[in-house]
Image: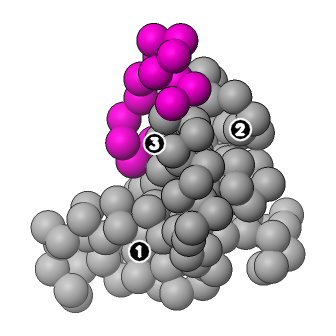
């Protein structure tokens, strides 16, 4: 499961990130609907005919979007409670994305390892250097 920062890197032309995608089958790569929302917020400032907008929408069209469902909501509630107990709160969207990956038993690919490191049960990796 790709995090928002990975999508941003690909659209900005990071060839290392883009080439990593080719190592996987289409069914293995996807994003949370929360990531889609974050990414689309960033696109809202671009004109629909700009090179970045067109590249970004092409990327979104190529990715599977996993819907945030009741299982993910329960995982998010449990994760938030766990982090609050140990005094390690995190951003709302990162919490939702991390919980979604946990609920789906997916590895989250992110450059934002600092915010995800405290999430028990989350498997994550970084392609960002």
Check disc 2 and report its element: helix, strand or loop.
loop
Relative to residue 33, is residue 92 drawn left or right? left
Residue 56, disc: 1
Frontmost residue, 106 versus 125: 106
Mark closest to the chain's N terminus, 2 or 1: 1
Nearer the viewer's eye, disc 3 or disc 1? 3
Task: Tell me where the magenta segment starts and ends, as one range.
Answer: 81-94
- Distance between mark 2 and mark 1 Cα atoms: 27 Å
Which label was assigned to residue 122?
2
Q: Residue at x 26, y 62 (%)?
A: 42
**Which residue is at a point 46% across and 21% down the rendered structure image?**
84
Q: Mark 2 near mark 1, Cβ–Cβ under 8 Å?
A: no
Label 2 crowding class (10 Å Cα cut-off): few <14, some 14-19, many 20+? many
Q: Position of residue 126 (x, y in %)?
A: 68, 37
Whole-number angstrom distance, CA of label 3 to CA of label 1? 21 Å
Q: Quadrant of the N terminus?
A: bottom right
Which is more toward the observer, 103 or 38? 103
Mark closest to the chain's N terminus, 2 or 3: 3
- Answer yes or no: is residue 7 visible: no
Q: Is 48 above or below relative to 93?
A: below
Disc 2 versus disc 3: distance between alpha carbons?
12 Å
Residue 39 is one of the magenta-drawn residues? no
- Residue 26 appears in the figure: yes
Residue at figure coordinates x 61%, y 49% from the top left = 75
Neighbor class of circle 3 (other Cα within 10 Å; few <14, some 14-19, many 20+) is some
Numbered label tally: 3
Circle 3 residue: 94
Residue at position x 43%, y 69% from top? 36
In the displayed structure, 97 sits above or below 82; it is below
Which is nearer the N-term, disc 3 or disc 1?
1
Q: Nearer the viewer, residue 99 or 62?
A: 99
């Amino acid at each position: 499961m790709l995090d928002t920062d990975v999508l941003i890197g690909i659209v900005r032309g990071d060839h290392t990130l883009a080439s990593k995608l080719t190592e996987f089958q289409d069914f293995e790569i996807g994003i949370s609907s929360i990531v889609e929302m974050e990414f689309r917020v960033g696109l809202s400032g671009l004109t629909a005919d700009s090179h970045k907008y067109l590249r970004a929408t092409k990327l979104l069209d190529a990715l599977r979007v996993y819907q945030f469902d009741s299982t993910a909501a329960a995982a998010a509630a449990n994760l938030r409670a766990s982090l609050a107990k140990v005094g390690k709160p995190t951003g709302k969207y990162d919490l939702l994305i991390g919980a979604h990956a946990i609920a789906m038993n997916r590895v989250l690919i992110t450059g934002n390892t600092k915010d995800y490191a405290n999430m028990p049960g989350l498997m994550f990796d970084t392609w960002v250097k």
